Amino acid sequence: MARRSNRKRRKPVPVPVASMGDIAFLLIIFFLVCSEVAKDKTNLEVTLPLSEYVEKQEASVAARVAVDEAGQIFLDGEAVGSPKDVEWGVRAMLASTVADDQRHVQFKCDAKLPKDTFEPVLKAIAEAGGIIDAVGEKQEE
């Protein structure tokens, strides 16, 4: 004969899941309110270069670098002194990235700038490990 245990069987305790949806939406709202939406804060009036090879980029941008027509360099809307400052700033911003799609740096400069003015900035971004996304306008064919 099989022996029956003298212990009482416990009834399963139900887990209340009715409020889980509310908690999830509250967390989403909290993170949306607390996060800073990446925007182009430079507000520079520049004439963008024309090219027939301009395409819309879908990748998210880790940093924004701009050079105005006077040659002043901006990193995420803040003026910096030299291309070396851009390199160190971009390097710091990319320090926590692991994938290539997180390493995109948007570069915008005035079309009238000579090559020797903006080329050191491009080299600084590349030395920092950034993938350069140049901003331009589509040239009419």
Image (cartoon, rainbow, N blue to C red):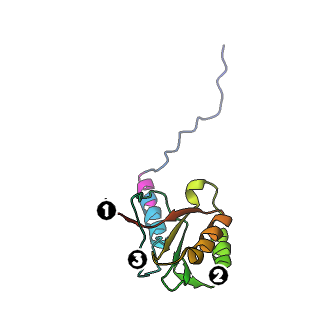
x and y, in percent, of residue 99 in the image? 61, 54
Separation (CA) of disc 3 from disc 2: 22 Å
Q: Amino acid at mark 3?
A: Thr
Q: Secondary structure at mark 1?
A: loop
Separation (CA) of disc 3 from disc 1: 16 Å
Q: Is residue 95 visible?
A: no
Find out whether the residues at labels 3 and 1 contact each other: C-beta distance under 8 Å. Answer: no
| Residue 71 or residue 26, whichever sits in front | 71
For the magenta stretch, what is the residue range? 18-23
Q: Residue furthest left?
A: 141
In the picture of the structure, the residue carrying the numbered disc 2 is: 82
Q: Residue furthest top?
A: 1
| Residue 113 or residue 89, whichever sits in front | 113
Left-right relation of 138 to 42 = left
| Residue 8 or residue 90, whichever sits in front | 90
Residue shown at 52%/44% (left/top)?
A: 13
In the picture of the structure, the residue carrying the numbered disc 3 is: 47
Separation (CA) of disc 1 from disc 2: 35 Å
Residue shown at 48%/67% (left/top)?
A: 31
x and y, in percent, of residue 82 in the image? 64, 81
